[in-house]
Image: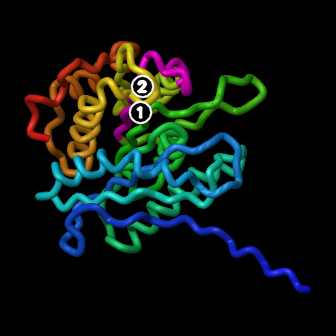
Amino acid sequence: MQERATPAREARLGKAVGPVPGAVGGVVLLLPSGEETSTRRPSPFAAPLLRPLARRLTRAGREQGLVTHAVHYRYRGWNGPQAELARDAEWAAEEVVRRYGDVPICLAGLDMGGRAALHAGGHEAVNSVLALAPWLPEDDVAAPPEPVKQLAGRSVLIVHGTDDRRTDPELSFRLAGRAKKANRDVCRFEVHSDGHAMAQHRSEVSALAVDFALGTLFGRPFSRPLQDALAAPPPIGLRMPLAAGFGRSLSL
């Protein structure tokens, strides 16, 4: 009996959240978490974790025509030099250009999706990168360091809980330091006493994400804390504390 060939998996964009089919002014691509090594299909629970952020973003950016899409990867794993999730993020940026034309893109990733956002940030249509609790490999003298040159000319925000037990916040601090040397528009906020999901301060983290995305995509003025973090020299601007109640006074 002849075996059937296994169809190749393809990445895809989730359903658009926002004012489609109206005029699209900018797009946020939401990159879910993943695993270090796996050829399994992505977890069905990964993308839905970003839905509250998608809704808040599109609600705040409705007048500017902000659209969000979750990226559905081909595989669950990063898979070493294959960097599967970063490849899928680059494909997603290309797909946005194909669908909507020349609009600015913000890559917003969580966990392994944060790493994918940082790697794919060099795509010509991407103007900003948001990495939430990014998974990064341990420093290894035998392996090349995580790339940062592709982030030149982009605005970059990293947010990490100080009590994260899944992804090491110290690694994101080191990466931010290297990125800052090549690009002044890099900052990093620390969510003190919060874990990987930053659940205790979810509202503040979402407000910061909205502040950053709308500012980079549409030129809205940043809040004062974000302005200060971007302007401050290392390490101050890379260890900026996210204050409790952030965003309550903002129209986000």
Q: Quadrant of residue 20?
A: bottom left
**Secondary structure beneath disc 2?**
strand
**Label 2 Cα crowd, 10 Å radius (few <14 / some 14-19 / many 20+):** many
User: In the depicted view, which residue is nearer to us: 12 or 65?
Assistant: 12
Q: Quadrant of residue 74?
A: bottom right
For marks 2 and 1, the one nearer the N-term is: 2
Relative placement, left or right, of 242 versus 64 is: right
Residue 97 position in % (x across, y down)? 39, 68
> Residue visible at 49% across and 49% down?
45
Q: Amino acid at mark 2?
A: His
Relative placement, left or right, of 116 versus 67 is: right
* Quadrant containing the N terminus in the rendered view: bottom right
Label number found at residue 183: 1
- Residue extending farthest to the right is 1
Q: Which residues are magenta?
A: 155-171
Relative placement, left or right, of 191 versus 12 is: left
Label number found at residue 160: 2
> Residue visible at 36% across and 33% down?
157
Residue 32 position in % (x across, y down)? 48, 47
Q: Of tags 2 and 1, which is closer to the observer?
A: 2
Residue 245 position in % (x across, y down)? 18, 22
Tell me if residue 23 is in the magenta stretch: no
130 relative to 104, above or below: above
Q: Distance from label 2 to label 1 (Cα)?
A: 20 Å
Tell me if residue 156 is in the magenta stretch: yes
168 relative to 53, above or below: above
Residue 67 position in % (x across, y down)? 27, 60
